[in-house]
Amino acid sequence: MDSDQFLLRIDALALDASIGIYPQERAQRQLVLADLELVFSAVSAAWSDEISHTIDYDEVLACVNELIASRHFNLLETLAQRMLDVVQERFPVERMMVTLSKPAASGSTRRISVTKAMAPRKIRRWGRTTRQVLCTADAEASAWQARSAVHLLFRRFGCNFVGWIVLFFFSGFGKHDLDRRFLRLAKP
């Protein structure tokens, strides 16, 4: 882990899931315990002490619970992969690992578990990833994605450039003007 990275660990998250291939498993929902580890950069959160500058674990929990409620899963492996995909899609994690356990899967064991790790993702400063973050600020108008874009600019150019960008964007322009300016910067 780099010096500017943080590890968010969620241990033994109890989920009421529809999971399993056997008829008795399909008949009723089961307890699944989830352990999640998310590695992300939150240097600005360490300085500002603002929740808006980091990953809000309540939002991660809501995202996972939404996934669990959305459908039936046959395998723990499928659920683990979907969790990785959904969390990676919604939050700027650089690495992630999820462990899912079914305590009631077998009478002869304490629990059955599966672990899946997301391959380390290097955030490229001016590659496709940066353009995607900047473009989604217009498509979604999401505050998190806009903060991520500013964070990428901060990491690339430093404090003076980011201060100039903030003054440039917020000097009397509306939200839509800000989004159009992000799009202009994001074009290849």
Image (spheres, grey):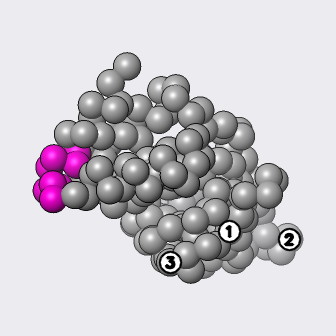
Tell me which label, 3 or 2, sits earlier in the chain. 3
User: Is residue 87 rendered to the left or right of residue 7?
Assistant: left
Inspect the image, locate mark 1, and give the three-letter code of the amino acid beneath it: Leu
User: Is residue 183 rendered to the left or right of residue 75?
Assistant: left
Residue 17 appears in the figure: no
C-alpha span from label 2 to label 1: 33 Å
Q: Give the range drawn in magenta.
A: 172-179
Above or below, 113 against 111 in this view is above
Residue at the spot 40% in from the left edge and 51% down from the top edge: 164
Of residues 117 and 134, the one nearer the viewer is 134
Inspect the image, locate mark 2, and give the three-letter code of the amino acid beneath it: Ser
Helix, strand or loop status at disc 3 = loop
Q: Which residue is disc 3 drawn over?
A: 50
Residue 125 coordinates in the image, percent (x, y): 56, 34
Of residues 114 and 94, the one nearer the viewer is 94
Tell me which label, 2 or 1, sits earlier in the chain. 1
Mainly helix, strand or loop, the magenta region? Answer: helix
C-alpha span from label 3 to label 1: 16 Å
Residue 19 coordinates in the image, percent (x, y): 54, 60
Sort mark 1 into few (<14), some (14-19) or many (20+) by Cα contacts within 10 Å. some
Q: Which residue is disc 1 drawn over?
A: 8
The answer to if 173 sits in the magenta stretch is: yes
Q: Which residue is disc 2 drawn over?
A: 108
